[in-house]
Image (cartoon, grey):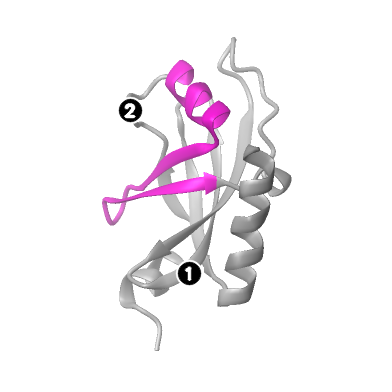
Amino acid sequence: MIDDLVQRLATGDHPVEAARPEKTVLALKECLDRGYLHIMFKDTETELGIQIDQPHSKLDADFGNRKGTIHVEGGVTLNYVRTRLIADIDLSTLEGTGRLVPVSEDEYKRMMAGVADSVR
């Protein structure tokens, strides 16, 4: 049985924002460069920190002019459920849409192993 919050966040796209440690493009870029990002699901006020899965994320946008959209994916465990967080963030607002996708233990390990490899 899947957790209620995970089920809710896995159903459709939800409004999200990238506002930690502050809601600026510079702070977002620094988080992306470190490979770790906080995403807030606004409708449930659920904030999740993810290790960015670089091979599945598309982070090429015009950060200097706050133009474009980034696509971020990463692994996170929420209420003991292994998931992939998928979000698209507009640089002009630092907001967008996101969802969770429950994954198997094996898929989660593969995803996180890839994250560790890309950080080295």
Q: Secondary structure at mark 1?
A: strand
Rendered position, 21 above or below 3:
above
Location of residue 50 with respect to 18 vertically, above or below: below
Q: Earlier in the sequence, mark 1 or mark 2?
A: 2
Q: Quarter of the image containing the N terminus? A: bottom left
| Residue closest to the eye, 75 or 58 | 75
| Image quadrant where residue 110 sits | bottom right
Q: Residue 29 in the image: state x and y as whole percent.
A: 53, 23
The magenta span reads 25-51
Left or right of 98? Residue 5 is: left
Is residue 34 within the magenta segment? yes
Residue at 62 percent of width and 75 percent of height: 106
Disc number at residue 53? none
**64 or 52: nearer the eye?**
52
Residue hosting label 2: 21
Q: Mark 2: which amino acid?
A: Pro
In the current view of this chain or complex, which residue is farthest to the top?
Answer: 64
Q: Residues within 10 Å of mark 2 (few under 14, many from 20)?
A: few
Magenta region includes residue 53: no
Q: Residue at x 41, y 74 (%)?
A: 7
Residue 83: x, y in percent? 50, 66
Q: Which mark is residue 82?
A: 1
| Lateral position of residue 16 relative to residue 74, left or right | left
Q: Give the residue at x 52% y 46%.
A: 51
Q: How many numbered marks have been drawn onto this rendered protein structure?
A: 2
* Vertical side of 22 occupied by 78: above or below: below
> Could you tell me residue 22's position as x and y percent?
33, 24
At 62% from the left and 38% from the top, the residue drawn is 119
**3D distance between C-alphas at marks 1 and 2:** 25 Å
Kind of residue at disc 1? Arg
Label 2: which secondary element:
loop
